[in-house]
Image: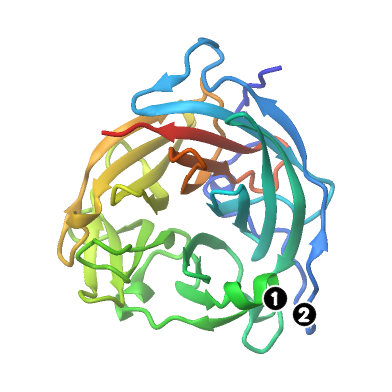
């Protein structure tokens, strides 16, 4: 049955925006914890717009299906970044600096389950969980040839993991970042993280965009880290939407996922597309809107986006929500086919 969230007095703006997401932080541990197997239960989401169950296409996006996810494991939830591969395996990060890994099971094009799920804390170079250093609020995830990058929003750091060799036991090293990153707003730091692919002017650079840390022109700040043209750029904000993640398509566009919250409107999401050729030092990015959705649709606090090719060659978008470990929010996973331009 479709379930519409009711945003009442129990929900605060600070909770939705992540201010309370570390309230149940794990106590620092001196020893690395091995990955733990977990069971993830699912409830199918058959319609993106319950008011029009037969409608599948929303702009250039075609709804493939979705899942509401839950688990009895106390650390499950708070998903803020995800990367999905063409065989259905995924890697996600939570607000509490945990990895969550598993495999999506399909019936046709529609996701119907999650199996082989594991959870493990992120480890620093010394082998201890990064939470032992007081580092939480892991918000964004990027992958490049077996190397995984994770941004930590409040402390404005980016970690690099050799995931391809060590999996969930990979240990982090710090990525050198521009000094301007230290000026970001504490709880409005880097939420978008992706690697510029071959064929773009900044191939190999790490692209990082802040949620809402404004420059002199009231645009949110972006960074090109490494690559042939390191430097600063910005993203124009509008309608009170904030940047919460991004991913690159096979067609060399960057998709920027945004979120809005207000007491009147509740939560909303928007997806914008920008040609990655425009991502250059000094640029102000705007792009075009692909889709926007409010609480009338099957959304929650959408914070993560991934792009992959299906076995049949379609471009598939996966979106996940951050439930802030709240009993009145949901962890949902939605998948769409992105049609060619």
Q: Nearer the viewer, mark 1 or mark 2?
A: 1
Question: Could you say where residue 309 lies in the image, as x and y percent from the top left?
Answer: 46, 45
Q: Residue at x 28, y 76 (%)?
A: 227
Q: Is residue 338 visible?
A: yes
208 horizontally vs 164: left or right: left
Q: Residue at x 64, y 51 (%)?
A: 78
Where, quadrant-wise, is the C terminus in this rendering? top left
In the depicted structure, whether residue 62 falls above or below residue 19: above
Report if the CB atoms under discs 1 and 2 are less than 8 Å apart. yes
Looking at the image, which is closer to me, 314 or 68? 314
Reading the image, the residue beneath label 1 is 169
Question: Could you say where residue 297 lies in the image, as x and y percent from the top left?
Answer: 52, 23
* Pointer 1 local density, CA inside 10 Å: few below 14, some 14–19, many at least 20: many
Residue 262 in which image quadrant: top left
Q: Residue at x 31, y 77 (%)?
A: 226
Q: Is residue 122 visible?
A: no
57 horizontally vs 179: left or right: right
Where, quadrant-wise, is the N terminus in this rendering? top right
Reading the image, the residue beneath label 2 is 32
Label 1, label 2: how far apart the Cα atoms are: 8 Å
Looking at the image, which is closer to me, 275 or 223? 275
157 horizontally vs 72: left or right: left
């Amino acid at each position: 049955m479709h379930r519409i969230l009711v945003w009442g007095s129990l929900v605060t703006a600070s909770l939705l925006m992540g201010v309370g997401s570390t309230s149940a932080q794990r106590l620092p541990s001196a020893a690395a914890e091995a990955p733990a197997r977990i069971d993830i239960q699912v409830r199918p989401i058959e319609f993106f717009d319950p008011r029009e169950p037969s409608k599948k296409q929303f702009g250039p996006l075609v709804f493939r299906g979705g899942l509401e996810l839950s688990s009895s494991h106390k650390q499950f939830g708070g998903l803020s970044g995800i990367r999905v591969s063409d065989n259905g395996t995924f890697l996600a990060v939570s607000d509490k600096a945990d990895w969550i890994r598993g495999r999506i099971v399909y019936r046709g094009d529609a996701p119907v389950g999650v199996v082989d799920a594991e959870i493990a804390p992120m480890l620093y170079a010394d082998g201890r969980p990064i939470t032992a250093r007081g580092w939480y609020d892991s918000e964004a995830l990027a992958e490049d040839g077996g190397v995984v990058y994770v941004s930590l929003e409040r402390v404005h750091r980016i970690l690099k993991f050799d995931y391809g060799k060590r999996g969930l036991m990979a240990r982090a090293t710090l990525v050198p970042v521009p000094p301007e990153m230290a000026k970001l707003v504490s709880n409005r730091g880097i939420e978008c993280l992706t690697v510029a692919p071959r064929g773009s002017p900044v191939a190999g650079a790490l692209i990082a965009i802040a949620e809402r840390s404004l420059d002199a022109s009231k645009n949110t700040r972006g960074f090109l880290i490494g690559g042939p043209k390191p430097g600063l750029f910005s993203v124009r904000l509008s309608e009170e939407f904030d940047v919460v993640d991004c991913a690159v398509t096979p067609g060399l566009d960057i998709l920027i996922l945004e979120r809005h919250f207000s007491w009147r409107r509740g939560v909303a999401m928007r997806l914008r597309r920008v040609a990655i050729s425009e991502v250059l030092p000094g640029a102000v990015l705007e792009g075009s809107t692909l889709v926007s959705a409010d609480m009338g649709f099957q959304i929650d606090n959408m914070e993560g986006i991934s792009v992959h090719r299906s076995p049949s060659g379609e471009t598939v978008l996966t979106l996940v929500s951050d439930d802030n470990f709240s009993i009145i929010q949901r962890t949902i996973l939605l998948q769409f086919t992105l049609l060619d331009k």
